[in-house]
Image (cartoon, rainbow, N blue to C red):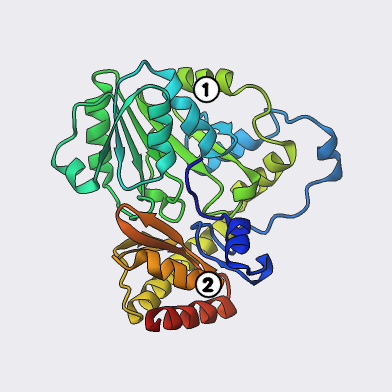
Amino acid sequence: MLEHGGRLRQAAARYGIPLARWLDLSTGINPNGWPAPPPPAAIWQRLPEDDDGLEAAAHAYYGHPAPLSVAGSQAAIQALPRLRPAGHVAVLDPGYAEHAEAWRRAGHEVRPIAAERLREALPPVAVLVLIHPGNPTGARFTRDELLAWHARLAADGGWLIVDEAFIDTTPEHSLADLGPRPGLILLRSLGKFFGLAGARVGFVLAEPWLTEALRERLGPWPIAAPARWIARQALADRAWQRATRERLPVESQRLAALLARHGLPPSGGCALFQWVATPRAASLHEALARQGVLTRLFTEPASLRLGLPGDEPAWTRLETALLQASSA
């Protein structure tokens, strides 16, 4: 298993700090996510049903005519490489490591590529996998860039896969409203912006033949009925979405300013996290963890990703921890 943020029990055991005393900034998940009410009791007695309105809610939210619901975008990340013969795949680097790992396991030759190198020249590959905005770097691409790469790949039967897990605060930068198009595959999730990571609800926006192939591979009932019910309500709550799109960028800028005041100016980020590339990443991660503040450590390049504190006591605690870590 690859390393991921959010392994709070592991951190609690390692540092001898009870779970309740941790400030977890390691995931980039909205700490004030959609306030999910309890599902109706009857839902627990029924198998999930495809015509329960979830896909219609996703269609209205994403603007794509035929979204396929999956058990988080991770399910699609693992299944998509099995739908193509082995070939050459370029994956944005640094990035969410599960993408490259899934393609390697399926027998493809994977080439990591930095955002700046990609802008210089698209390598000769059959598949290009991007995270947009980048995770952990926050790298962004224009729609014109994305569509140009898609056109080149699709002309030879290739795919452009764009993981849009962090794009909900800026939906105008998404390609969701342009589909379905041959060779264009978008991955969306309710884990980050909506803060519903535990529900494990995601969507694939692609051509009908591909979503049908994925549906067959993933099998029936990929999402539990209560999670489908909660996801449907969240996707329809326009007032909460508007307020959250206004709030998150402000909080992200507050985090960037806080880090800069402590000698850690961010190297990148988005509305849900800030990314600090520094040779001190490992020692800072350790110093913060010893105070019960969990960050996401990356080794290549040496860097930290920090999500947003959820309330004023959490902001104060982070500032105190940064002060102590920088003086250690």
User: Against 249, is 112 above or below?
Assistant: above
Give the number of the mark in front: 2 or 1: 2
The x and y percentages for residue 314 are 56, 76
Amino acid under label 2?
A: Arg
Residue positioned 52% across, 72% down in the render? 290
Q: Look at 38% across and 64% down and name the residue there.
A: 282
Q: Quadrant of the C terminus?
A: bottom left
How far across and down, in percent of the image, does residue 86 sit?
Answer: 34, 18
Q: Amino acid at mark 1?
A: Leu
User: Can residue 177 be seen at all in this image of the molecule?
Assistant: no
87 in relation to 78, above or below: above
At numbered mark 2, what does the secondary structure look like: helix, strand or loop? loop
All told, the count of numbered labels is 2
Q: Which mark is residue 48?
A: none
Q: Which residue is mark 2?
A: 290
Instruction: Name the side, left or right, on which 50 lies relative to 38.
Output: left
> Based on the displayed image, in which of its 4 quarters is residue 49 positioned?
top right
Please report whichever mark, 2 or 1, sits nearer to the chain's N-terminal start: 1
Q: How crowded is the residue under tag 1: few (<14 C-alpha within 10 Å), some, or many (20+)?
A: many
In the image, 169: left or right of 195? Answer: left
Q: Where's residue 80, x and y in %? A: 45, 26
Point 34% across, 81% down: residue: 261
Gap between marks 2 and 1, in whole Å?
A: 43 Å
Packing grade of label 2 (10 A; few <14, some 14-19, many >=20) is some
* Mark 1: secondary structure: helix
Label 1 sits on residue: 214
